[in-house]
Image (cartoon, helix red, strand yellow):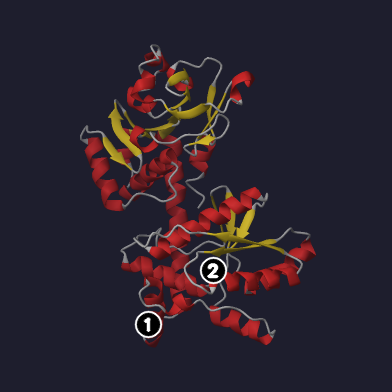
Amino acid sequence: MAMLHLLAPWARARGIRLKVATVDHGLRRQAGAEAAMVGRESAGLGIGHDILEWRGWKGRGNLQHEARAARRRLLAGWARDHGFEAVALAHTRDDQAETFLMRLARGSGVDGLSAMQPASRAEGIAWLRPLLRIGRAELREWLGARGIAWAEDPSNEDTRFERVRVRKALGILADLGISQDGIAATAERMQRARAALDHYTHEAARAIARLQAGDVLIGAEGLAALPEEIRLRLVAHSLCWVSSADYRPRLQPLIEALADVNAGRTRSLHGALMRREGAEIRIFREHAAVSGLKALPGQPWDRRWIVTGPKNLAQDNALAVMALGEEGLAQCPDWRETGLPRASLLASPAVWRGRELLAAPLAGKGRGWQAGLLHGAGHYFATILSH
């Protein structure tokens, strides 16, 4: 609510289009009324408002994690649908400190302990956090002084949730001289260290990594010569890029997988496969991870590929883009001429009409169809530096 009232005049003065979204998770009876209150407040400021509903909680797993992921997904889709380039989030200095302590408890390294950034990119959207240096108490005071009402979520007092327990622990830590400001300052120093590590990972990637039809190939000798932290960062980034994953694999499975690959074994991790091929390590999509994915031609498939073809067929709704698989590869007699390994081609996009394979652009059966990456080599290297 504070961010809404702060952004409204700022955006109006600059001619920036603003719209408000409230995510109703359907978990509390009061949520609908609170969302309606935001709608009335937005209307009073001359700003449109949408309510995004999530009913995905099955009663199992980590509720706050799933709700957070759902919010991000719903907001990103809403922003894209409305042609917005950015979404502003009201994370505060308190959130910064709480997140640091939660990740510290999990044994996070430099990345996990790094401060949230005022601006980042994910899912094709810029995520802005203009209130990171301001505390919740300051915002409540600001609202109260202006007679602006707000809603308090009772789950913020529910100690079943980790964040609430951490929030309460901050009061105890303050008595020891460990303040929110001090924690936030440490997180900012961690962010500077992270930026330096990313810089050298980017330099290493430029020197020893290359792309081939969506696969990443890394010089094995050059990789082994890197400091361990840079080596692990480069492999983790490559796995994420190949699998379109938002988060890196956990550290210990990553270390073990890389050790296996160096010993000559193929390893599956994070929706991708890794194996040694001569002087290089190839990281490529795992067929099992994409075997159930389906899209229409011209639509993103696996969040990576766009398959287009002849105009007379491209709009045929009976067609589907799916993984080539064993059945499809058997219908591509010239696949060896592509220079791509069999296991990589199994996870490549192909055009199907029912059980009939129409085209497999990466496997030597183009028939007028093309498969292009949504993001190419430039994206692979650039995203090492952007978060």
- Position of residue 277 measured from the top left corner of the image (x, y, whole percent): 30, 27
In the depicted view, which residue is nearer to us: 68 or 355? 355
Residue lying farthest top? 333
In this figure, which residue is indicated by the disc labeled 1?
A: 173
Q: Which residue is depicted at the point 39% across and 43% down?
A: 234
The relative height of residue 354 versus residue 384 in the rendered view (above or below) is above
- Foreground mark, 1 or 2, reads 2
The residue type indicated by label 2 comes to His
- Position of residue 236 measured from the top left corner of the image (x, y, whole percent): 37, 45
The relative height of residue 320 versus residue 142 in the rendered view (above or below) is above
Q: Cα distance, mark 1 to mark 2?
A: 21 Å
In the depicted view, which residue is nearer to us: 323 or 218? 323
In the rendered picture of this protein, how many numbered marks are placed on residues? 2
- Position of residue 168 measured from the top left corner of the image (x, y, whole percent): 39, 81
Circle 2 packing at 10 Å, graded few (<14), some (14-19), many (20+), is: many
- Position of residue 144 measured from the top left corner of the image (x, y, whole percent): 64, 85
The residue type indicated by label 1 comes to Leu
Q: What element carries label 2?
A: loop
In this figure, which residue is indicated by the disc labeled 2?
A: 91
- Residue 185 in view (yes/no): no
Q: Residue 20 vs residue 156: left or right? A: right
In the depicted view, which residue is nearer to us: 185 or 126? 126
Of the two numbered discs 1 and 2 on the same chain, state the one appearing first in sequence: 2
The relative height of residue 34 versus residue 249 in the rendered view (above or below) is below
Q: Which residue is depicted at the point 30% across and 52% down?
A: 251
Q: Which residue is depicted at the point 59% across and 21% down?
A: 313
Q: Residue 132 vs residue 40: left or right? A: left
- Residue 201 in view (yes/no): yes
